[in-house]
Amino acid sequence: MNAFCVPVRTGGKAQYHPRLMLAFLIFSYANGTFSSRRIERATYRDIGVRFVAANLHPDHDMIATFRRTDRTAIEAAFAQVLLLAHETGLLRPAGSRCAGAGRGGATGILEKESGV
């Protein structure tokens, strides 16, 4: 958490703690929401995001600025989350198949279309 930069400001919009921003950013990514505008909207509409964001509502510009200024720290934290998920069995290895995928990926789709 020390890798995140927190600029000192005397006025303007309220600042949010990097832990809070990181938590709801990772939660949003895990649920397939990547757009800063959609993440902002989710802080109002999605009960899970509202809980993780402590019912605070950073605007999309603040979310985008956080991602831009703390990119390497976010990447490192996200890598730790993925490693933890893998260690606990919540994440499959990269080469594993999805249930019902047949022969797998694009190859299986092409074979089904060509009738092979």
Image (cartoon, rainbow, N blue to C red):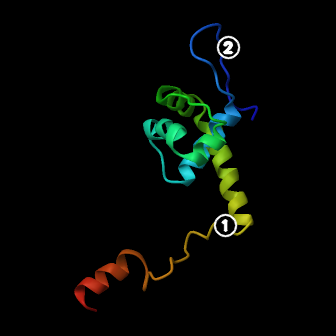
Q: Are marks 2 and 1 in contact (CB under 8 Å)?
A: no
Could you tell me which quadrant the C terminus lies in?
bottom left
Q: Residue at x 30, y 85 (%)?
A: 111
Which comes sooner in the sequence, label 2 or label 1?
2
Say which residue appears at 65% left-offset and 51% top-offset: 79
Q: Specify the farthest residue to the left.
A: 114
Image coords of residue 101 (percent x, y): 44, 81
Closest to the observer: 27 or 111?
27
Pointer 2: residues within 10 angstroms few (<14), some, or many (20+)? few
Image quadrant in which you'd find residue 85: bottom right
Estimate how packed mark 1 is, as few (under 14), some (14 to 19) or many (20 or more) residues with alpha carbons within 10 Å. few
The residue drawn where x is 52% and y is 37% is 44
Q: Nearer the viewer, residue 2 or 85?
A: 85
Q: Secondary structure at mark 2?
A: loop
- Numbered marks: total: 2
Point out residue 82 in the picture as x, y percentages from the top left corner: 65, 57
The quadrant in which the N terminus is found is top right
Residue 58 picture location, percent across and down? 55, 29
Label at residue 90: 1
Give residue 113's position: percent from left, percent from top: 25, 83
- What residue lies at 43% left-to-right and 36% top-to-bottom? 37
Q: Is residue 90 left or right of residue 58?
A: right
Asked if residue 91 is positioned above or below residue 50 in the image, the reply reads: below
Tag 1: amino acid: Leu
Give, as a three-letter code, the residue at label 2. Answer: Val
Between marks 2 and 1, how big is the CA–CA gap? Answer: 38 Å
Element type at mark 1? loop
Is 72 or 20 nearer to us in this picture? Answer: 20
Position of 113 with respect to 47 (left or right) is: left
Q: Is residue 111 left or right of residue 70?
A: left
Q: In the drawing, what numbered circle is on residue 8?
A: 2
